[in-house]
Image (cartoon, rainbow, N blue to C red):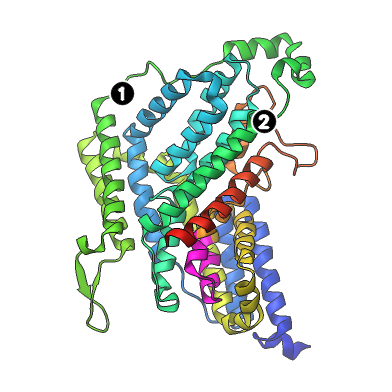
Amino acid sequence: MLASILDPTSGVAIVLQILVILGCLLTGTRFGGIGLGLISGIGLVILVFLFGLAPGEPPVSVMLTIVAVIGCAATLQQGKGLDVMMQFAEKLLRKKPEMVTILAPITTWSLTVLCGTGHVVYTMFPIIQDIALKKGIRPERPMAVSSTAAQMGITASPVSVATVSLASILAENAGITHVSFSIPQILMVAMPASLSGVLLAALWSMRRGKDLDKDPAFQERMKDPEFAAQLEGQGQTLIGKTFPPSAYRAVWIFFTVIVLVVILGAFEGLRPSFPDDDGAAKPLSMNLVIQMLMLVGGAVILLACKVDHKKIASTAVFKAGMTAVFSVFGVAWMADTFFSAHLDQLTDVLGEVVAAAPWTYALALLITSKLVNSQGAALVAIAPIGLALGVDPVVVIGFYGAAYGYWILPTYPSDLACIGFDTTGTTRIGKFVINHSFLIPGAICVFTSCVVGSGLAQLLL
């Protein structure tokens, strides 16, 4: 028995190593992204020093790309450009308040697509609730699906951590798969797939729950004068606020950078070429292109838009993004150490299963996403394994939507914030925890995205 444990490739040792990894993931999620990265380091040390596995490769290229994107987006936020985008979104919602359950999730999805992070949704929650209440609409209907839509937008954004990670993984594994896909190719599948899921979830949400005037729990709370006064007195809006011209310049600079990323990804002939190790000329990788353009975009916003450089690191976008970087660092390094050591064995055991039932890859990605609470970290951990096991890159792109798995339990910050902003109490966590407001919208979004994405991937790629 001791000999089996000491042999790192034995069945007993592999099971113990898996338990170590799962233990670190489950423990780390209790402490957020930073805690997840730190505690994954414990698992890494155990795998290397106790089981004798050779340390894997940390995802340095992916991490640097994420840092560049976050730096540009955070500079945009500090330059008030993000507020300009929020104000425009609110104007659209207030023009058709009766359609808030459809328009609100489309709006939060679009904001995420443009900014690359679902954390832009926080400002929209009180606005969505205010519009719903004034039209007598149950706030849970637009608010819950808007929260899930914001996270689904990550799988459709050209500058999100997840999309950048997926493009990088496909490029780095081109030697195994003999094919690589650009960000525009990924997005022509991912964008319609993601939006289809959001629209279907929004349509379902229109009739969810009881109207406020027929909801006994809400009507009972309205008997409390203090509660009723609180609802009547609240109402937040960005309409009427004025922003300096520099804020609008920041938005246009950011949009220009996004357009350039898409163009250079679509037409590799526009990128400079350099000799590789074999002397053959190859276009500059999109990882480096994104890093360069995002650094330049952030620099131009900083120089041209009167941004207070001392406060950039204090923005919500910067904090959330750097937390994601740390999470990706620890989780991906630990996972790569394990899977690199046992790839041959896993291929023998799981290769035929994954080849016969590619949906098992999507299931593994979904579960991992829930465990790590990050689409980017889940992709960095699972996508290379799927490719190594023989999953077609086209299938990987088609199942991109499965990277959003943290709707299963209401533990993600945006979901918790959504519950907090809904002062009517209709957006909630149920008695059994699993019966919460985001469960069905999240399931509809992901399932629809995977079905539509898989079909589009087979047709277009």
Sequence order check, earlier mark of 2 and 1: 1
Instruction: Note whether 224 is above or below 414 in the view shown.
Output: above
Residue occupying image coordinates x 48% and y 39%: 109
Residue 335 coordinates in the image, percent (x, y): 56, 70
Q: Quadrant of the N terminus?
A: bottom right
- Secondary structure category for the residue under label 2: loop
Residue 258 coordinates in the image, percent (x, y): 31, 47
Q: Is residue 173 left or right of residue 346?
A: left
Q: Nearer the viewer, residue 74 or 108?
A: 108
Other residues around mark 2 within 10 Å, as few (<14) / some (14–19) / many (≥20): many
Whether residue 74 is visible to the viewer of this picture, yes or no, is yes
Say which residue label 1 marks: 243
Question: Of all residues shown, which one is farthest toward the front?
Answer: 459
Residue 157 coordinates in the image, percent (x, y): 42, 48
Query: Which region of the structure is painted magenta?
Result: 379-397
Residue occupying image coordinates x 26% and y 43%: 256
Whether residue 377 is visible to the viewer of this picture, yes or no, is no
Q: Amino acid at mark 2?
A: Thr
